[in-house]
Amino acid sequence: MEKPINSLTFVENELEWTESRFRLFRRRQEIKVRAPIHEIYIDGLPLLALIEPSEADDPNRRIPLPWSDQSEMFLEQLKELLGGPVPADRNGRAWLLYCQCGDPGCGGLSTRISITDKTVTWSDLGWDDIFGTPTEPVEIDRTFVFERAEYEKALHALTRQFSGTSDHKL
């Protein structure tokens, strides 16, 4: 058995961007939008910085997990990361990062998840959308191996936080 080499944590953060709002018969309005997020960190670094350092500051590729007003989608994503069923249109791939709008159709980072008694492995990372476009591999070929008990502990803690329960198990 390969020894787990990575640690997974989620860091609460805030994402800020500017949206243009068009108004009938008035000038376009620029609005700053802020949303709480939970960034995926591996070995103390943001996931995107590890797989595509040149794009780590691109806000359109940075959004990790949907914020609280999308909690149902977020809970589904956590179930997938824990080995739950993945929708058929995703070819067995679980999503890790989304566009800041939270719509999978805009694209995001996905992975194949393999779970054994002792480990959870993320492999074959790539950029996907839900329109059948072939997965675009990330620039740096990375595989992450986590100790299963610690991995599940981190994901269950986040699940409890967003589901509002103290003993929720997926």
Image (cartoon, rainbow, N blue to C red):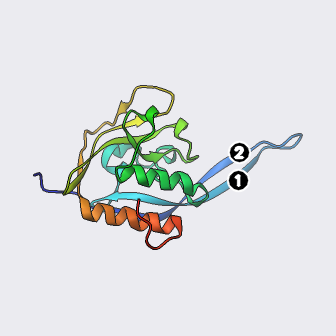
Tell whether 39 sits left or right of 140: right
In which quadrant is the C terminus drawn?
Answer: bottom left
Q: What amino acid type should be assigned to the residue bearing mark 2?
A: Ser
Q: Residue at x 50, y 33 (%)?
A: 130
Q: Residues within 10 Å of mark 1 (few under 14, many from 20)?
A: few
Tell whether 65 sits left or right of 44: right
Residue picked out by circle 2: 20
121 or 106, which is in the foreground? 121
Q: Residue furthest top?
A: 133
Tell whether 113 sits left or right of 98: left
Please say if 113 is above or below 71: above
- Residue 67 position, x and y percent, is 55, 58
Local secondary structure at mark 1: strand
Q: Residue furthest right?
A: 25
- Determine the CA span between mark 2 and mark 1: 6 Å
Q: Residue at x 46, y 49 (%)?
A: 62
- For marks 2 and 1 on the same chain, the one whose residue lies earlier in the sequence: 2
- Residue 104 position, x and y percent, is 52, 40
36 or 21, which is in the foreground? 36
Tell whether 80 sits left or right of 18: left
Q: Residue furthest bottom?
A: 166
Q: What amino acid type should be assigned to the residue bearing mark 1?
A: Ile
Q: Residue at x 21, y 51 (%)?
A: 116
Please say if 95 is above or below 32: above
Q: Residue at x 27, y 39 (%)?
A: 140
Residue picked out by circle 1: 31
- Residue 74 position, x and y percent, is 50, 54
- Residue 75 position, x and y percent, is 49, 56
